[in-house]
Image (cartoon, grey):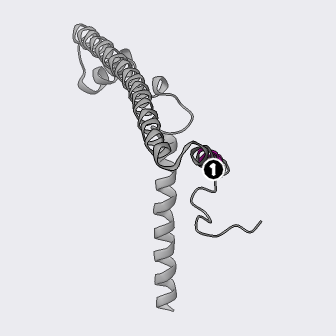
Amino acid sequence: MKKVALMALVAIFTLSFSLTAQNKGDKGRSGSRGMSEMRWTAKDRAETMTKQLELTADQKAKVEALFEKQDAKRKEQVAKQQEKRAEMTQDRAERRAEMMELRNKAVAENDAELEKIIGKEKMEQWKTYRDEQMKKMRNRASSGQRGMNRNVPKTN
């Protein structure tokens, strides 16, 4: 009987912790509220500080001005970071285009050398086969079958 009571107590204790952990997100930073709603304004923070520390009206005004200055600086920093992020995205697109150009050039050079070895007619056959394989790979990738049934021979 003691074991059953102990197990029930442990289960209730564990369940209460998991429910508490789930409810904490509702109060604070998560949910449908945006970032602007989450942050206290400079005035709100100054009010709270005034109540907690019993500041004078002059001190409150100076604290509020300081908080407004900090908020402005923070907004400026966020804007700079967003600019950097946009630049990095643009740089990535440029690098990708450059790499694609280099790859296409290398493929063209390899095809030219291969054509010297196997001849023009077989090279055309090879290009047709290669294009068909690329289309199949793209179709598989777009349908979510990437890597599936790779080594299984097809029966037609």
Q: Which residue is mark 1?
A: 129
Image quadrant occupied by the C terminus: bottom right
Residue 145, image x and y in percent?
A: 63, 57
Q: Is residue 26 left or right of residue 103?
A: right
Which is more toward the observer, 78 or 109? 109
At horizontal 41% and vertical 22% (from top left) the residue drawn is 90
Q: Is residue 80 left or right of residue 128?
A: left
At horizontal 51% and vertical 28% (from top left) the residue drawn is 34
Q: Is residue 91 magenta?
A: no
At horizontal 44% and vertical 27% (from top left) the residue drawn is 97
Q: Main secondary structure of the magenta part?
A: helix
Which is more toward the observer, 106 or 138? 106
Q: Is residue 62 left or right of residue 46?
A: left
Identify the magenta region. Answer: 127-137
Q: Amino acid at mark 1?
A: Tyr
Q: Is residue 143 left or right of residue 120?
A: right
